[in-house]
Image (cartoon, grey):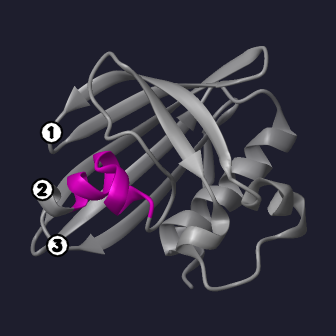
Amino acid sequence: MQSDSYAVMTAPLTVQVERLLPGSAERLWSYLVDADKRSQWFSGGDTLSKGANNRLHFQHSVFADEPTPEKYRAMDDGGFTSTVTVTQFDPPRLLAYSWPNGDHESEVTFELFPAGKDVRLVLTHRRLRDRSEMTGVSGGWHAHLDA
């Protein structure tokens, strides 16, 4: 794995991950918004649409062949659902949503850029609570994007 495939801090309480992925922007877009396709690498739930409150349903055992990390094992018993609000929706280029976590709300942005026969995905997670949350989401995005 190249070191530039890991998350980097781009601003206070902000991490960013980039990946060069095969296929067209339209194909990759469908893996961001379509619940069935998204469940193969991140979360199921609702197919995302602009302005709506959308459910993301997480269940590690659905998309990974490896054992669920101990920290998240309880979530595999029925999974865990979180509700996000889509704030930007510009297919097949830009998707963003606010993501509540208790009394705090962060924001996740996915940007897709054509790169020849591939697509460059830039994922930015902003307004994280603290360094501990930055570390946690960095590792999580890395693992999910590798799936």
Q: Dot 2 lies on which element?
A: helix
Residue 51 left/right relative to 28:
right
Residue 29 belongs to the span the image colors magenta: yes
Residue beneath the point at 15% across and 39% down: 91
- Vertical arrangement, residue 54 with respect to residue 29, above or below: above
Q: According to the image, label 2 marks what residue?
A: 26
Q: Are marks 2 and 1 in contact (CB under 8 Å)?
A: yes
Residue beneath the point at 78% across and 27% down: 129
Q: CA distance from mark 3 to mark 1?
A: 15 Å
Disc sitting over residue 91 in the figure: 1
Amino acid type of disc 3?
Answer: Gly
Q: According to the image, label 3 marks what residue?
A: 23
Foreground residue among 45 and 50 = 45
Amino acid type of disc 1?
Answer: Pro
- Vertical arrangement, residue 38 with respect to residue 130, above or below: below
Image quadrant where one finds the N terminus: bottom right
- Vertical arrangement, residue 115 with respect to residue 122, above or below: below
Indicate the quadrant where residue 9 lies.
top right
Q: Are marks 3 and 1 in contact (CB under 8 Å)?
A: no
Amino acid type of disc 2?
Answer: Glu
Read off the magenta span: 28-39
Please tell me which of labels 2 and 1 falls first in the chain.
2
Disc sitting over residue 24 in the figure: none
Foreground residue among 127 and 92 = 92
Q: Dot 1 lies on which element?
A: loop
Residue 134 left/right relative to 130:
left
Q: CA distance from mark 3 to mark 2?
A: 8 Å
Foreground residue among 18 and 55 = 55
Please tell me which of labels 3 and 1 falls first in the chain.
3
Residue 96 belongs to the span the image colors magenta: no
